[in-house]
Amino acid sequence: MQGRAEEPAVREASGLARRTGCEAHARAHANIALAKYWGKRDAALNLPAVGSLSIALEALYTDTTVRFDDRLAKDHVELDGRPAPAEHARISRFLDCVRERVGLRSHASVSTWNSYPTSAGLASSSSGFAALAFAATRAAGLQLSVAELSALARRGSGSAARSLVGGFALLPPGRREDGGDCYAVCLMEASCWPLVVVVAITDPGSKRTGSTKGMTRTAETSPYYRAWVEASEADLAAMCDAVRTRDFPRLAELAEHSAFKLHALMLSARPPLLYWNAGTLAALEGVRGLQAEGVPVFATLDAGPQVKAVCPEAYAETVAERLGRLAGVRQLLRTGLAGPPTVREAPP
Ligand code: DP6
């Protein structure tokens, strides 16, 4: 057996997938949305109310090992080497989806590790549930297509559906009530447009209100929620066009509009969802300053205080140097774009 051979998820559909007994390892990359998902049309099936478009990040990933074992009395979950009581119920519920699908009764041992700060608004649920979906199905002996894996990962976390395809990923909201048409597709491969993302971490701690809760509150209380959903189809279509034509200025304008509109929407919830801190504003000002000097760069933010600056490869050094100097920026991560997840053989 070839130790640690890697196998891209995309090959699964063509039948090259291998089962690794009851244990499997997967690595999936986090993604950040350029057209944001916020709001659900069905909470039970976790179906998004709006479509979204993201880029997968090479340096930000989750490694997950899943082993189903008849001898376990309950699921065991470890995150970054420690028991994970806060994540346990959500992960167990997700494993139930996999167990139901194969008629498996065994509990599982899940060991997962993030290459970046967990729950800090850096999309750890995207890489987390993508890696879990891939490793758990493989460990259960299931060989799913990429579309099936993406739809399954979506049950764990909407953004995770996009990490199953890598590159520039498009997740439509779908129309079907059973969610059968709600899975991500690769709009364009990462290598077609080598962008770089500089992440300015302004607070590595856990975020205050998780996305799931935040979305529910927004949908229930914001006077602007309907307008957000109504504009989403046109916003997304324009962004797909900007990506396909590799039009950076257009993409920059559309992505900033989506991010700032999302945060305006969050602020309009009751009570408001305010994710920014002083460092967030400093980093946004830093990006504004670079733009004023003619540097092609744009900013985006998710449900957390970190600022992600996106630019063509040639400008990454300039952007990192500028953001790294700012007082409120505690740490910088710099990454290119990533492809789909990989799966690895279990050790003997
Ligand atoms: C702001 O995918 O974390 O990052 O489906 O409830 O798990 P759940 O939400 P999640 O939300 C991501 C929200 C966002 C925007 C995005 O990634 O599209």
Image: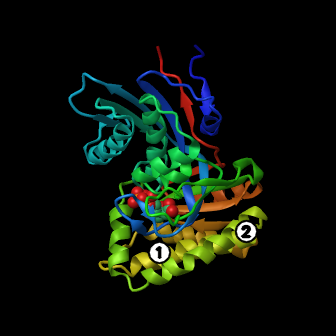
Q: Give, as a three-letter code, the residue at label 2.
A: Asp
Q: How crowded is mark 1: few (under 14 residues within 10 Å), some or many (20 or more)?
A: some
Q: Nearer the viewer, residue 23 or 80?
A: 23
Instruction: Decide: few, some or many residues near mark 2? Use Cα within 10 Å; few <14, some 14-19, many ≥20.
Output: few
Q: How many marks?
A: 2
Q: In which quarter of the image is residue 286?
A: bottom right
Q: Which residue lies furthest to the bottom in this view?
A: 223
Residue 290 sits in quarter: bottom right
The residues tagged by marks 1 and 2 sit, at their Cα atoms, a distance apart of: 24 Å
Q: Mark 2: which secondary structure? A: helix
Q: Is mark 2 within 8 Å of ligand 1?
A: no
User: What residue did someone put label 2 on?
Assistant: 241
Q: Residue 309 carries which label?
A: none
Which tag is nearer the camera, tag 1 or tag 2? 2
Amino acid type for the residue under numbered disc 1: His
SS category of the residue bearing label 1 = helix
- Image spot of residue 267 (x, y percent): 40, 78
Which residue sits furthest left? Answer: 73
Q: Which residue lies at the image location 31% right of the left edge and 80% below the top edge?
A: 270
Give the residue at mark 1.
263
Quarter of the picture containing the N terminus is: top right
Residue 94: x and y in percent read 35, 45
Q: Image check: 9 left or right of 227?
A: right
Q: Where is residue 146 in the image (x, y as percent from the top left)?
A: 57, 44
Q: Is residue 222 above or below residue 10?
A: below
